[in-house]
Image: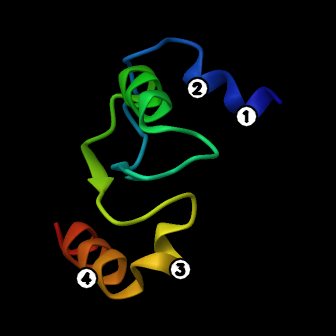
Amino acid sequence: MDSFNVFSHPGKSPLTFLPVLLGWGAQNRTLTAIWAGFIAEWLSPDQFWLIENAGHMPMYEQPKLVNETLEVFFKQ
């Protein structure tokens, strides 16, 4: 669990931390979009993406959209 210490200070990423894209299924019934807001506030990701027409597994439910978005993010 020591590896999670980098998340001990909400809203602050370590200087050496890689860019973060937080993607969340807007129709996620397992962890609703409200949780996405809490996690986004805690992690302060470089980009936050609420994925429409996707639930708990957007990579399965919207594979083309997720892959295209990841490609753009990785190229930045």
- Tell me, yes or no, whether the two marked residues, 2 and 1, touch with CB atoms within 8 Å: yes
Task: Say which residue appears at 47% left-offset and 68% top-offset.
Answer: 58
The N terminus lies in quadrant: top right
User: Please, what secondary structure does the residue beneath circle 4 have?
Assistant: helix
Q: Is residue 37 above or below residue 69?
A: above
Q: Residue furthest bottom?
A: 64
Q: Which is nearer the eye, 64 or 9?
A: 64
Mark before the other along the chain sequence, 3 or 4:
3
Say left or right for 37 vs 48.
right
Mark before the other along the chain sequence, 3 or 2:
2
Task: Say which residue appears at 24% left-offset and 67% top-offset.
Answer: 73
Q: Which is nearer the eye, 76 or 63?
A: 63
The crowd level at tag 4 (other Cα within 10 Å; few <14, some 14-19, many 20+) is: few
Tag 4: amino acid: Glu
Q: Which is nearer the eye, 54 or 74?
A: 54
Which quarter of the picture shows residue 62?
A: bottom left
Give the residue at mark 2.
Answer: 6
- Residue 49's spot in the image, x, y percent? 27, 51
- Residue 18's spot in the image, x, y percent? 40, 49
User: Please, what secondary structure does the residue beneath circle 2 have?
Assistant: helix
| Mark seen at residue 3 | 1
The C terminus lies in quadrant: bottom left
Tag 2: amino acid: Val
Give the residue at mark 4.
Answer: 68
User: Please, what secondary structure does the residue beneath circle 3 have?
Assistant: helix
How far apart marks 3 and 2 lie (CA) works out to 29 Å
Which of pointers 3 and 2 indicates the residue nearer the eye?
Answer: 3
Q: Is any part of residue 14 visible from this angle?
A: no
Tag 3: amino acid: Tyr
Give the residue at mark 3.
Answer: 60
- Residue 67's spot in the image, x, y percent? 35, 82
Mark before the other along the chain sequence, 2 or 4:
2
